[in-house]
């Protein structure tokens, strides 16, 4: 997690983008799999864990970005959207609430944009960052 401490917004934007690509690609993977076999209810091995892995990376990126950003609204926005993303992903796994299929796109795209905005426009609090690492 050393890399996420150094460039959390870059890592967060990449993880959120990969999550978005994963979500967009999922229906196509199932279509290809359905055409290749008669059973289409089973996902490819490990495919369901990719989103959890990316969510974990995103957690560390949001955590670090919220520690070193100088804007409080950015901290709350990052965490709110991560919680929304977490909720949608967990809901897909356990089918707790009936949600619109593409509900995952909103928090994923918003996290990408927030990380990019934070990286470009929010100055990092280097004193607080150095104090936390030392």
Image (cartoon, rainbow, N blue to C red):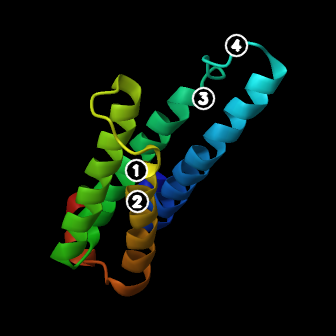
Q: Nearer the viewer, mark 4 or mark 3?
A: 4
Dividing the picture into quadrants, the one containing residue 32 is top right
Q: Which mark is residue 106?
A: 2
Q: Are marks 2 and 1 in contact (CB under 8 Å)?
A: yes
Q: Nearer the viewer, mark 2 or mark 4?
A: 4
58 relative position to 27: left or right: left
Q: CA distance from mark 3 to mark 2?
A: 21 Å
Q: Which mark is residue 39?
A: 4
54 relative position to 59: left or right: right
Residue labelled with disc 3: 47
Q: Position of residue 51 (x, y in %)?
A: 49, 38
Q: Residue furthest top?
A: 39
Name the element at disc 4. Answer: loop
Pick whichever of labels 2 and 4 is earlier in the sequence. Answer: 4
Q: Nearer the viewer, mark 1 or mark 3?
A: 1
Q: Nearer the viewer, residue 86 or 4?
A: 86
Residue labelled with disc 1: 103
């Amino acid at each position: 997690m050393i890399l996420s401490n150094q460039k959390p917004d870059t890592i967060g934007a990449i993880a959120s983008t990969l999550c978005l690509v994963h979500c967009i690609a999922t229906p196509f993977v199932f279509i290809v799999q359905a055409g290749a076999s008669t059973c289409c209810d089973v996902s490819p091995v490990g495919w369901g864990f990719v989103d959890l892995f990316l969510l974990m990376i995103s957690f560390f990126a949001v955590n670090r970005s919220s520690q070193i950003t100088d804007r409080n609204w950015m901290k709350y926005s990052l965490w709110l959207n991560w919680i929304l993303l977490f909720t949608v992903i967990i809901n897909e796994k356990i089918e707790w609430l009936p949600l619109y299929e593409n509900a995952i796109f909103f928090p994923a795209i918003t996290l990408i944009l927030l990380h990019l905005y934070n990286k470009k426009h929010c100055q990092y609090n280097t004193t607080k960052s150095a104090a936390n690492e030392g």
